[in-house]
Image: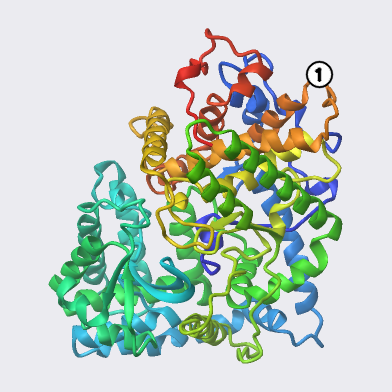
Amino acid sequence: MVGSALRAGMFVTLLATSVAAMPPGHTRTWGFDLAGRNTSQRPGDTFYGYANGGWLKNTPIRPGSFRAGPTDDLDQAALVATRALIEAAANDTTNRSKVALVYRAYKDRAAIERRGVEPLTPLLAIIRAAPSKAALVGQMGASFGSFSGSPFRIAIDADAMDTRHYVIGLSVSSLGLPGNSYYSDPKLDATKAAYRLYVLHMLAMAGWQQPDQAANMVIAFETALAGASAKTSPSRDPVRAYNPYRVDQLGALAPGIPWDVFFSGAGLRPVGNVIVEDPSRLKAATAVYASASLETLKAWMAFKAVDRAADLLPDRFVDASDRFHLMALKGWSEPQPQWQAALYAVNTIVVDDVSRLYLTSYFPQDTSAATKAMGENMRQAFAARIGRLTWMSATTKAEAQKKLAAMKIEIGSPGVFADYTLLDIKPGDLFGNAVRSRAFEWHRQTERLGRPVNRSRWQIPPQYVGASYAPELNLVAIPAAFVHPPMFDPSADAAINYGALGAAMGHEMTHGFDDQGRKYDANGNLRTWWSARDAAYFEAQSKKLAAQYSLNEPLPGLHVDGAASVGESIADLGGLLIAIDAYHLSLEGKVAPIIDGYTGDQRVFLGYAQMWREKQTESFLRSSLLTNPHSPGDVRVHETVRNIDDWYTAFSVKPSDRLYRQPPDRIQIW
């Protein structure tokens, strides 16, 4: 995840507190951008437009980006600050830290140009010389610690049926294009054609034989994989996604693959049980592999190697990668600057050392204390909401309260980072450093097997903006970089903080009780703890919420996939409800002040709307609608607030307003 974070759209940032680091129009007085409103619009007709209409009209998407919004502005300020930290280390000639060595190696473009594609040649030679498909399978297994590819993915995580131990998970890997429809939908033919040209260009630059024919093979192979995957419906049910198999049983399920060779290549022998996420999809993907020619598989693996290693090769590879991944797929107007690509490389190779640098300089203790106090307020508010539920039985409530009480809410960093003492980082050897880093990280993962589960493990490094909930660990993690304006500002009005960070924190907490998370118990184990009646009510309300979201059509002919996004929709609704209640708790019985004519409840909702304001390129929006479980910002705002009674009261929303829903039609879950 860390290595692909920037390309996947995750934002790296720092806890910048200077006025220059604030998004345009952001005010330090109480935290809301008054100039960004459009007060000619009624909140009940378009609350998103009322809160953000002025900003939407006057804010362009900057060159070299695919969207604009608070996180995008903060990302840029953060990248500049991160650059200063890393360059300060790299420019000190006495500094021999791994961060400094990697950055210097990346910036030595002359040396990289001289070496050309030579660093990748040994891997390409291994692929080219493979005498059989079985021989390639071992290289597919080895890809988890190197640069080649595999149609199958291995993950080593806590066993969902016994979270004290780790287990191997097996699934089908993602493809080169964002989703299956990119291979079959005629409206996306131009993107598929651009992908073919990219494959051809990369293989030709790498010296692969007959690159035009090879590119056709790659596209045909991935199109077949996409078609096979499209015939199966991925389940949102974690119980259905838990399918244990012995390795010697995999041959009967998915024949044609020497699975023992695959796992041996990955450094995983002997292997006991593996958990297959989707047996029908694995079987379908294996059939595509079985029907592919040896030359097709070689061409595909060679392309994957070049594509994954592109940022470590000469500028022509970096430029081609940016032009496809960032410009063609996401709508960036220009490639990313070299210094930004250098930061990406450092974060990929020695991410935990960057984490240490970041935390030393950019996570104040007073911020840590304030946000942790907010977290406990959120827990208390959630517990009270569970206690007041009229649709849930006492038995289920007791289990829910037990799970909430056990939930860890951690803010800042996990506190324990990788020890890179044994990671060999050499001066001037960017490619070799990356290879050794990949092998080092994969070895760390394989070593988990047979050891107790680390229950403090995070999914997101502290210098990245984001938030996560890990159901097997029952852990909410809020990285330090997320805890700054406009998400959280210690000098801002508490209502704005609760509408932004509070709602985001509540969102992650609610993931523990969404359509997937609710099936895990307080210890993170998959276990039925709901009564049949309570589960039936929850599922019925979830379907109603999914149907509500599916009515939205952000692009002509392309609707929000309410079923695929229902977990995020439940979390948005629960998160904001909990945040409102937690804000009330924070007042400690005092009356909320009126600020610039707005009540406390109004400011919570305005803080929420401001957090989700965004503009994005059409290509990025299309990709998100097809592949991202999160709905666009305006949909998240409108479909959440219109289900909350307090919003109607706060803004005097009337039946004649476009967003109005009759009380019986408002979705009630948490």
Residue 121 versus residue 504: which sits nearer the camera?
504
At label 1, which amino acid type do we have? Answer: Gly
For residue 228, side relative to residue 507 (left or right) = left
Residue at the image position 85 percent from the left and 50 percent from the top:
18
Which structural element holds mark 1? loop
- Residue 356 placement (x, y as % from top left): 74, 73
Query: 10 Å neighbourhood of mark 1: few (<14), some, or many (≥20)?
Result: few
- Residue lying furthest front: 394
- Residue 432 placement (x, y as % from top left): 53, 87
For residue 598, side relative to residue 302 (left or right) = right
How many badges with numbers are in the image? 1
Q: For residue 516, say whether it is visible.
A: yes
- Residue lying furthest top: 656
Q: Quadrant of residue 10?
A: bottom right
Residue 86 versus residue 515: which sits nearer the camera?
515
Residue marked by disc 1: 597
Residue 487 versus residue 159: which sits nearer the camera?
159
Residue at the image position 50 percent from the left and 38 percent from the top:
632
- Residue 544 placement (x, y as % from top left): 39, 30
Q: Quadrant of residue 83?
A: bottom right
Picture layout, residue 293 above or below residue 119: above
Q: How is the image coloured?
A: rainbow
Q: Quadrant of residue 626?
A: top left
- Residue 546 placement (x, y as % from top left): 39, 35
For residue 365, side relative to residue 642 (left or right) = right
Q: For residue 614, say whether it is visible.
A: no
Residue 79 versus residue 585: which sits nearer the camera?
585
- Residue lying furthest left: 291
Q: Quadrant of the C terminus?
A: top right
